Amino acid sequence: MGIGATLLNILILMQVSIQGDLRTRAHVRYGGKDSTAFTWFSTRASLSFVPVTSERLETKLGMTVKTNGYPFLTNASDLSDASKLEPVSFMLDEVFVRVYDILPGLNLTAGRQKVHWGTADAVNPTDNFTTPDYSDPLVWDERRPVWMVYLGYMPVGDFGIELGAKPIFEPAVATAPEWFSVAVLPDIEQLRNGLIQEFIRQGLDSLTARQIAAAYTITVNEDIKLPSRNVRDITWGGRLKGHRGNFDFALSFLRGYDFLPAVQPVTNIDVMEQRLDFVLKQWFPEKKVVGAELAGNLFGVGFWAEAAYAFYEDTLVKDEPSVICGFDYAVAGFYFNLQYLHGDFPLARLQKERVKDFILGAVERKLFTDRVLTRLGGVVDLKKGSFGLVPLIRFQPVGGFEIDLGGMVFSGGNGSAFAPLNKVDELFFGVRYRF
């Protein structure tokens, strides 16, 4: 018997609760006779253990192993590195200890955990504790757990307060470059051409400008900085929440950082040394976020509204509001979900105008005693008319086992929110088992 099987048997004998998630999915991007290719292939296995659970105490240990189907080689010596030939990453999920009723109504959770703020189910402007995970283009609201201490206190019936502190900042996980790659840095030739144009603007003729520019030494570098490890850089916040009748509501405040970096190109030209140095400075802006949220149900229609205003300490980043509101409704076997967002949408973050107006929506229908789910979801940039559509058919032959067949289509002209994704037309196939 192997070590893994022995450990599993020991955990079963200890009556440890075990949950798991195994999934794999392949994407095929089509763009013509000679340009059809796999653009995304990933397999992951997640296990979650609950070693101790009682009325006063709960513990959890979660982990995920993810493998990318494509080798990653940079030179011939990588052929001896199995991790480059079969790229595998190990990720720690939720790992925490939670103590209930330290005092009546007071709960404490310490460790790596997910803390969810907000009522919307696609984008949450008030949720700035847990790190976004943009690695999967099909999941816009995925979050990674973070190390933090969290207190929840319900002193009076349906009213309470939550307080949290996160000592370690973790930036967002970006989409893999084999699925979506963006040229962030200019190349040397582009900078040299820019130098030529600058000399021409100063009055030199084209030939002389090219001769002088050809003699320049050009360097291209990135300079990215994370928040420091000082106590003052801890992310912290609090939330007042309540429930009355059919309504849930909350007010929140958080001091933290953007999960995606701001950028500032810096070009230094030394005429005497005939040298041009380009540096793309990147940092994670500090901000304070004030938020409010409301959710409820009226006549069978669920609705929600969430708003946040971000105040940035950095004058290079503009203060901005984000508002999302929507409703969902089920009728005659159909499920409808429609949301309006004025704010920062993750897939459109590369555009110069960060705050825009979007419509997000989906319609679903279950068939054959709920074993088949058909779904059409999408997002529309109201300002420019660009959009993305994700049709999906999901078949569940037995409990816990799912088979997905779907597609992704994006359309966006110059200046639109989804212009960088304009060529994304894909089919995907996935299998998932949960236990």
Image (spheres, rainbow, N blue to C red):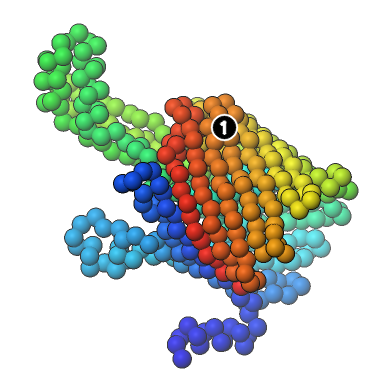
Q: How many numbered circles are shown?
A: 1
Q: Position of residue 39 (x, y in %)?
A: 39, 52
Is residue 326 depicted above or below 391 in this figure?
above
Is residue 255 depicted above or below 95 in this figure?
above
* Res. 167 visible in picture: no
* Res. 216 visible in picture: yes
Give whichever of 244, 35 is nearer the camera. 35
**Side of 98 relative to 233 (left or right):** right
Q: Amino acid at mark 1?
A: Asp
Choose top left, top right, bottom left or bottom right for residue 395: bottom right
At 65% from the left and 83% from the top, the residue drawn is 15
Q: Position of residue 149 (x, y in %)?
A: 62, 57
**Side of 58 relative to 405 (left or right):** right
Say which residue label 1 marks.
381
Q: Position of residue 167 (x, y in %)?
A: 54, 53
At 33% from the left and 46% from the top, the residue drawn is 33
* Viewport quadrant of the C terminus: bottom right
Give whichever of 326, 35 is nearer the camera. 35
**Side of 267 relative to 112 (left or right):** left
At 53% from the left and 32% from the top, the residue drawn is 386
At 45% from the left and 86% from the top, the residue drawn is 3
